[in-house]
Image (cartoon, rainbow, N blue to C red):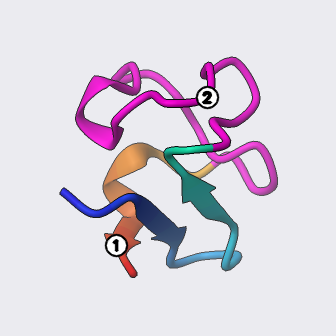
């Protein structure tokens, strides 16, 4: 899986090396909890694509 994943709804980018709200830095996309949502628009993980 890519180190960066982009929300197809709002364009927010999840970066593995930085982590995100509620997700520690270094967390691989596959290890991000399934109930995690985009911190900008609330989209589910399934709305993200690799970039």
Residue at the extreme right of the image, as rendered: 40
Give the answer, above or below, for where 43 lies relative to 35: below
User: Residue 9 appears in which quarter of the rendering?
Assistant: bottom right
Q: Nearer the viewer, residue 35 or 49?
A: 49
Distance between the Cα atoms at labels 1 and 2? 19 Å
Q: Which residues are magenta?
A: 18-42
Q: In the image, what residue occupies the spot 58% across and 55% down?
A: 14
Residue 35's x, y, as percent?
A: 44, 22
Which one is earlier in the sequence, the residue at label 1 or at label 2?
2
On the image, the x and y values in percent for residue 32 come to: 40, 27
Instruction: Return the residue at label 2.
Output: 25
| Residue 49: mark in rendering | 1
Residue 19 is covered by the magenta coloring: yes
Q: Residues within 10 Å of mark 1 (few under 14, many from 20)?
A: some
Residue shown at 61% from the left, 29% from the top:
25
Q: Is residue 47 above or below residue 16?
A: below
**What element does badge 1 sit on?**
strand
């Amino acid at each position: 899986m890519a180190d960066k994943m982009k929300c197809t709804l709002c364009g927010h980018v999840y970066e593995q090396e930085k982590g995100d709200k509620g997700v520690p830095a270094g967390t691989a996309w596959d290890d991000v909890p399934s109930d995690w949502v985009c911190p900008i628009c609330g989209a589910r993980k399934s709305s993200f694509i690799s970039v």
